[in-house]
């Protein structure tokens, strides 16, 4: 196992476990039983959507409204899953298991790697590590209750966006992804105050037709590998570390 | 929240997660098309990082979190290790809050 990757994913796993503990405590305080909170975390395994669903319950909303709020936040997994399709290619069991481990950070870690073997390793290692960390954290928080404290005091709410940004940096060295990211950020920031949670991030996909349709004139400025015999696929950016 | 709604939540989320890999498996795609499919992921993750930095729900957040993320990103731009980025971002935000910055 790559020591750099172990250390990097380890840092996120610790942060994930602490946020999980806070989720466990909040969910139990909102009236869910400990085992239901743990079951939700194991089978849903999507932190932001779980927080959103429990927030709807805590503010007196119906369970169905809570599930809908959570599912809207999870629609982003469809395009994220397309991006890692090659990693989960091969056997059916790999797809069925690997899909459940699809998390933002796993995709981000995979995107930051340049060769296919490291991409696969980064995806699986991040997915498994965060799955274990999240569920251990949630179970501990659900049992311990409110005594667990607020992760905001530890600044963890800043750690996750900073981590995602750091993992995206290697991809952003190329012009096209950089333009896509810039427009996506502007679209999401401009619409967050007026749209339901989860929708602005999906709307950010509108950045793609603006700058990067496949086969567009701009796209042709970067020749594909199959048009250049004797060369491997163009490097998608340096290794993140 | 009842067990049934949790089942609904879990099945819905799993189907959303499964869609990408299954489509990718079913549809014949060139390497170039596959490489293109990383762009939507870049767009989503960038939008996610940006909104999580600036907003709490639909409200603009105060200064401590964006400041921490900014210092973290600057750390990453200076090619310092990822662990340092995470610790510096969290540490800056936690420190500012300790000093009374909301």
Image (spheres, coloured by chain):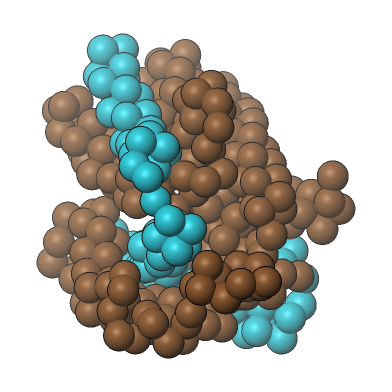
Locate residue A144, reporting x and y percent.
59, 27
User: Residue A18, can we see it?
Assistant: no
Left-right relation of A127 to A199: right
Colour-to-chain, brown: A
Do we see residue B27 in this rendering? yes
Q: Nearer the viewer, residue A229 or A7?
A: A229
Q: Is residue A27 above or below residue A168?
A: above
- Image quadrant assignment for residue B98: bottom right
Residue A38 in the image, given as x and y percentages of width and height: 49, 21
- Quadrant including the N terminus of chain B: top left
Of residues B94 and A241, the one nearer the viewer is: A241
The quadrant in which residue A210 appears is: bottom left
| Screen quadrant of the C terminus of chain B | bottom left
In the rendered structure, the answer to whether residue A122 lies left or right of residue A217 reads: right
Q: Position of residue A236 (x, y in %)?
A: 59, 71
Which chain: cyan? B
Q: Quadrant of residue A46?
A: top left
Q: Is residue A38 above or below residue A203?
A: above
Q: Name which residue lies at 52% across and 82% down.
A: A174
The residue drawn where x is 43% and y is 56% is B30
Residue drawn where x is 39% and y is 82% of the image? A220
Whether A173 is drawn above or below A50: the answer is below
Nearer to us in this view, A144 or A21: A21
Whole-percent x, y for residue A105 in the image: 55, 53
């Amino acid at each position: 196992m790559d020591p750099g990757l172990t250390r990097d994913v380890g840092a996120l796993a610790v942060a994930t476990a602490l946020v999980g503990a806070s989720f466990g405590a909040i969910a139990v305080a909102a009236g869910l039983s400990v085992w239901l909170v743990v079951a939700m975390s194991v089978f849903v395994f999507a932190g932001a959507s779980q927080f959103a669903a429990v927030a709807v319950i805590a503010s007196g909303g119906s369970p169905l409204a809570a599930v809908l709020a959570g599912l809207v936040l999870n629609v982003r997994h469809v395009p994220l899953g397309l991006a890692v399709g090659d990693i989960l290619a091969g056997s059916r069991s790999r797809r069925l298991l690997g899909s459940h481990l699809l998390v933002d950070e796993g995709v981000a870690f995979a995107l930051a790697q340049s060769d296919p073997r490291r991409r696969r390793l980064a995806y699986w290692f991040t997915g498994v590590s965060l799955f274990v960390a999240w569920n251990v954290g949630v179970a501990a928080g659900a049992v311990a209750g409110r005594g667990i404290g607020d992760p905001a005091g530890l600044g963890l709410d800043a750690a996750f966006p900073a981590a995602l940004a750091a993992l995206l940096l290697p991809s952003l060295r190329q012009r096209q992804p950089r333009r896509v990211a810039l427009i996506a950020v502007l679209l999401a920031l401009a619409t967050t105050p007026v749209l339901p949670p989860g929708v602005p991030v999906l709307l950010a996909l509108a950045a793609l037709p603006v700058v990067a349709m496949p086969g567009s004139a701009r796209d042709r400025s970067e020749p594909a590998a199959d048009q250049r015999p004797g060369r491997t696929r163009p490097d998608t950016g340096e290794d993140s570390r | 929240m009842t067990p049934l709604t949790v089942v609904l939540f879990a099945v819905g989320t799993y189907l959303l997660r499964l869609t990408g890999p299954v489509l990718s498996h079913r549809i014949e795609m060139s390497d170039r098309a596959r490489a293109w499919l990383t762009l939507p992921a870049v767009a989503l993750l960038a939008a996610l990082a940006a909104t999580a930095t600036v907003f709490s729900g639909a409200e603009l957040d105060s200064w401590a979190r964006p400041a921490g993320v900014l210092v973290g990103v600057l750390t990453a731009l200076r090619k310092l290790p990822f662990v340092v980025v995470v610790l510096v971002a969290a540490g800056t935000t936690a420190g500012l809050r300790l000093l009374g910055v909301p």
